[in-house]
Amino acid sequence: MSRFEKFLAGWSLRSSTPSYDPGDVIEVMITGDADGETVARIGDSTLRIEGAPDDALNTRVRVAVETWDETAHRGTGTYRETVGESAF
């Protein structure tokens, strides 16, 4: 193994279209309200969040993924709890 290979060992690139399974619990930032629905954008993907509080915009929340379409990079999740606020 070369020095360069040793240096890069364990590194990986992050995808702009992540994949989730139903039941996964993740933390996301609620970034908007599209057509009356609360959404979080994760890279180029969109997660519609059900049951979020009315003042959840720009907060970090924990959600349980309910559905995920890998082809469309869209899914739905259920709000669990607020875990933080925006740094902006």
Image (spheres, rainbow, N blue to C red):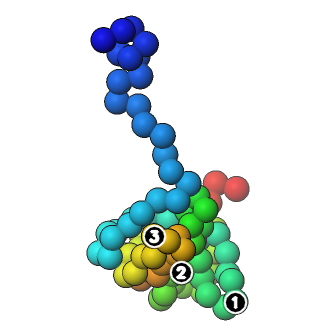
Occupied quadrant, residue 2: top left
The residue beneath circle 1 is 35
The residue beneath circle 2 is 48
* Label 2: few (<14), some (14–19) or many (≥20) C-alpha neighbours in 10 Å: many
Q: For marks 3 and 2, give the CA distance.
A: 14 Å
The residue beneath circle 3 is 70
Residue type, label 3: Glu
Furthest toward the front, the residue is 71
Residue type, label 2: Arg
Residue type, label 1: Asp
Check if mark 3's residue and mark 2's residue have beta carbons within 8 Å: no
* Label 1: few (<14), some (14–19) or many (≥20) C-alpha neighbours in 10 Å: few
Furthest toward the bottom, the residue is 36
Tell me the residue at 51%/81% (across/down): 49
Q: Measured from the top left, where is residue 73 in percent x and y?
A: 52, 70
Tell me the residue at 47%/88% (across/down): 51
Q: Measured from the top left, where is residue 34 in percent x and y?
A: 68, 83
Give the mark, 1 or 2, whose residue is nearer the N terminus.
Answer: 1
